[in-house]
Amino acid sequence: MRRAVPVLLACLAVLNLPPDEISPAAPDVVYHNGVVLTMEPAQPRAQAIAVLRDRITAVGRDEDVVALAGRTTRVVNLRGRTVMPGFIDSHAHWIGDGEMVGYSPEAAIDAALRRGWTSINEQFVDDPRFARLLALDRAGGLRLRVNAYLPVNYEDDKFGGWYLGLEPRHSYSPHLRPAGVKLFLDHDWGTTFHWSQAELNTYVLVAHRNGWQVSAHAVSAGALDQYLTAIASALAARPDPDARWRAEHVVQVRDDQLARMRELGVIASIQPGLPGESAKEAGFSALVARGSTGWIARWRDLVDSGVRTIGSTDMPWLVLVLGGHATELPHASPLEAVHQAVTRQSYLGRAPEDWQLAQRLTVEQALRLFTGDAAHGTFEEDVKGSLAPGKYADLVILSADPTSVAVDALPGIEVLATVVGGRTEHCAERVMDANMCS
C-alpha cells in the first residue's frame, strides 16, 4: 500500500490533470493507533482508517494507512480507543414524535448523535412530516441520515396511495430518502386488528408492484399471520426474491412463522428492550394468554433460524413508557440496546425471567443488529453498516471495545465522537484532543 499512492499520482500526472485534482488522493483524515471493529467478515479488525471527503478510502494496519497521509491530512491518534460503524436505529420516531414529548427536531437529532446514531429509520412520516424533513435538510439541520417510512394507515384510518407520487428510495440528499411504506396491523398487544385479509392483500400488492418496501407493525402472531399471507399473495402476483419485507416488533411468533418468514425473505425489526417493564401490563398478559411465553421476544430464535434481524429503540415511545422521562432522555443508547439483547434486562433493570434468558444474543450478534444487518434492512449495505473502502465515513469513536469489556460495562461505554459522512457531528466534552474533534 506504500507504493500505491506514488503510482496513482504518476498515472494522474500522465493524464495531465491539474494539481488540485491530484491532491485529493491523500485522505482528509487518518485515524490510527486504535481498535477498528469493521463489521466486515473478511477483515473484522484493524488499527487505522482513512477518510476522504464523505467516504472511507482505506482500512488496515497503522503503518499502511498512516503512509497514505499527505501534507494536509489530519492525523488522529486514537490512543487505543475503538472505532465502529455508526449505529443505525432501525425503528424510531426521534424527529417526528419528539415534539410530542417536548423535543424539537434539532434537539432530537442532537440527542441521537450524542448516543452514536448516524442513521435512523423514522417509522411514521406522513406528507406534512416529509415536507418538514425536506425543509430541515435544505437548511442543513438534518445532521444524520434519515430513512422515511410513509404510513398508509393509522389504526382504522386508511390514507390510500398518497405515497405513490414519490419515488421509492430516491435520495433527496445523502441525508434523506423515502425508504418504504408503513402499515399498522394490530394495536394494544394484538387485541385489535385494523385490516380484513382482502384489503391488506390489496394494499400490500399495490405497494409491492410500485417498487416500495413494505414495513408492517405486527406485535401479535395473529397480525403476523395476516402479513405473511399478504406477502405470499403479492409475491405470487409479482415475484421478487429481494423485496426485503419488514415486520416491526415481532413480539409474538410461532415456530411455523419463523420458517415462513425465512422462506419469504421477511426481516424481523425488533426492540431488545421489549417486553421489559411492560411484562407487567395487562395487555402483555393477554398476549401470553393467547400463546405462551415460549412465543414471546424470540430474539435468539430469530437470529438462529436465519431470519435477518435488525435492532432499534422505538424512541421515544418504548424508552419513555418503560422507564424514561421526556425531560431527561436517559436512554436510547445503542450500547444500552446491545446490553438488553445480551442480558435481557430492561430499561429499569428488571431481572429477566428464565424464558427471556433463553433468548439472549451474543455481543457480536447484537452489534450486527445495529450495523450491517440494519443497513441491509434499508437496501444500503453497499454504503453503510461496516467500515470498508468506498462506504460512507459514518463512524463512532468509543471509549472501550464492546466486544472485550464485561457485559455489565456495555451501557457505560462512552461515545466520544460521532462522524457522519466524514464530518464530526458530536464530540464529548471530556475529549480534550482538538484534533479528534475538528
Image (spheres, rainbow, N blue to C red):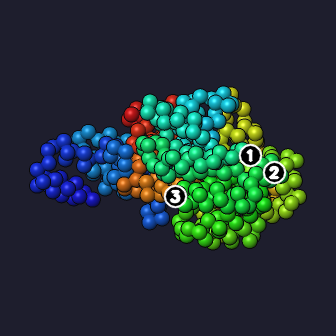
Separation (CA) of disc 2 from disc 3: 29 Å
99 to 393, vertically: above or below: above
Residue beneath label 1, please? 155
> Which dot marks residue 192?
2
Q: Residue at x 65, y 59 (%)?
A: 202
Is residue 367 shown left or right of residue 76?
right
- Where is 49 relative to 43, above or below? above
Question: How far is mark 3 from mark 1, CA to CA?
Answer: 24 Å
Which image quarter: residue 245? bottom right
Give the label, 2 or 3, closer to the camera: 3
What residue sits right under mark 3 in the picture? 211
Instruction: State the residue in front, 174 or 406.
Output: 174
Q: Is residue 370 visible?
A: yes
Residue 78 position, x and y percent, is 43, 44
Residue 64 lies, with reference to residue 228, above or below; the image says above
Among numbered discs 1 and 2, the one appearing first in the sequence: 1
Q: Marks 1 and 2: CB-CB under 8 Å?
A: yes
